[in-house]
Image (tube, rainbow, N blue to C red):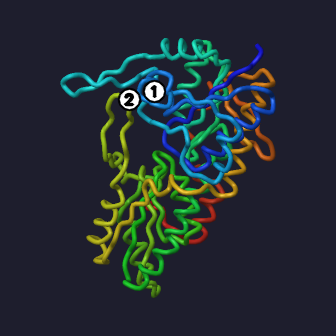
Amino acid sequence: MTIRKIAITTGGGDAPGLNAVIRAVVLAAHLRGWETYGIREGYDGLLFPERYPAGGLVRLLPDAVRGITALGGTILGTTNRGNPLHYPVRQLDGSYTETDLSAPLLQAFALHELDALVAVGGDGSMEIAHALAQKGLRIVGVPKTIDNDLAQTVITFGFDTAVSFATEAIDRLHTTAASHRRVMVVEVMGRYAGWIALNSGVSGSADVILIPEIPYDMEAVAQKIRDCEAFGQRHAIVVVAEGAHPKGEGYTIKEGAHAGHAPRLGGVGEHVAAEISLLTGKETRTVVLGHLLRGGSPTTFDRLVALRFGAAAVRALAEGQENVMVALDPPTVKYVPLAEATRRMKTVPLDCDTMLTARELGICFGD
C-alpha cells in the first residue's frame, strides 16, 4: 500500500527521549515525501478533537521538530488513562465504566486519510497497538519506558536517563547520611521490575537494594545495617524499588485500580525506613525520587536510541512492515511482532552479571 500520510502518538507515562523519536519520525518521513501528523495525548486528539482549540491532530513539519531532541517530555502530550479499547467514562454518581471506542477511532483514521501509525509507548501502549493492528490499522510500535521491562528489546529509551539521575541523587545522599550518621532510604520507580533500583544502587554504592524479584526479610536488612556500624560505617544507603515487598506480603499500593487505570505503587520506602529505625535504633530518612526520574533532558545514550528507533519505525513502514515493534538488538535495530512484544515482562534475572557483581560487592538484597 502506498503511504502518503502517517500519524504518531505518544502514550503512557512520559520519558526522556520521546521528542527525539518524534523528530526522527518526522524527518525520516519527510525525506520520503510523506506527511506526518501528531495525535494529541495518546488517542484523545482523534477521539475528542473538540477538547483541543488548536486541533487534536497537528501537522508536523520539519520546522516544528527543530531543537526538540534535548527536551524532556513530549510536545504531543500523553496520557495513561486513555486506552481506546477500555476508555473510562465517568457516570453521574462519580463512578467509572469502560467503553470500547476502537470503532470511532478507526473511523477517525480513515476520515483523515492516515495510512499508518507510529505508536510510541510502554507495554500497555504496545498491547493497544497490537489490538488496533488486528482491527486493520497499519502500525509500527516504538518501545518506551523508564522501567526497562519490555522483554523483546535489550533496552528502552528513558531508562538510562532515569538511572543516571537516581545515581546522582544517591551520590548526594551519601554526604548528608555520613554527616548525620543516618540511614537514607531512597525509593525509586520501576513498577514490578527492579532494573532502576539495581543499576542505580550498584552504581551509587548502596549498602542495601530491595527489588520486586526478591521478597525481602527486614531482619536481614537490619543485620546489614548493624554490620556496617560494626565495621565503622556509621551511615547506610538503602535503595528500594516501588514494587519491592516483604516475604509473604503483597505490594504497597498508593492508589487502587479503577476504570482505565492500573494500581499505583508507592510508599514502601516509608515502611522500610520505619522498620529499620525500629530494629536498629538508627535515625532514618526517606527520599522518594518519583516523577523526578521521568523528567529532564535525555542522556546521550537515550537520545541516540530514541532517534534510531524513530528512524527505524519509518524504515519499517517503507519496507512494508506492519504490526511490529522496533527493538534494540546490538549493534542493530530489529523488528519483532507486536504479539510477542508484551508476552512477558522483563524482570531482573537473579543470575545476571549486575546481580553477581552486587553480591561480590557485599550489597544486601534482603534475602
**For the residue carrying disc 1, how many other residues have a C-alpha within 10 Å: few (<14), some (14-19), or many (20+)?**
many
Q: Which residue is mark 2?
A: 260
Q: Which residue is mark 1?
A: 83
User: Mark 1 falls on what kind of element?
Assistant: loop
Res 307 quadrant in image: top right
Kind of residue sitting beneath label 2: Gly
Is residue 158 left or right of 182 when viewed as pictured? right
For the point 18% across and 24% down, the residue is 93
Q: Residue furthest bottom?
A: 232
For the point 56% across and 19% down, the residue is 132
Is residue 29 left or right of 292 when viewed as pictured? right
Observer-nearest of 238 and 325: 325
User: Mark 2 falls on what kind of element?
Assistant: loop
Residue 307 visible somewhere in the drawing: yes
Observer-nearest of 357 and 58: 58
Kind of residue sitting beneath label 1: Asn
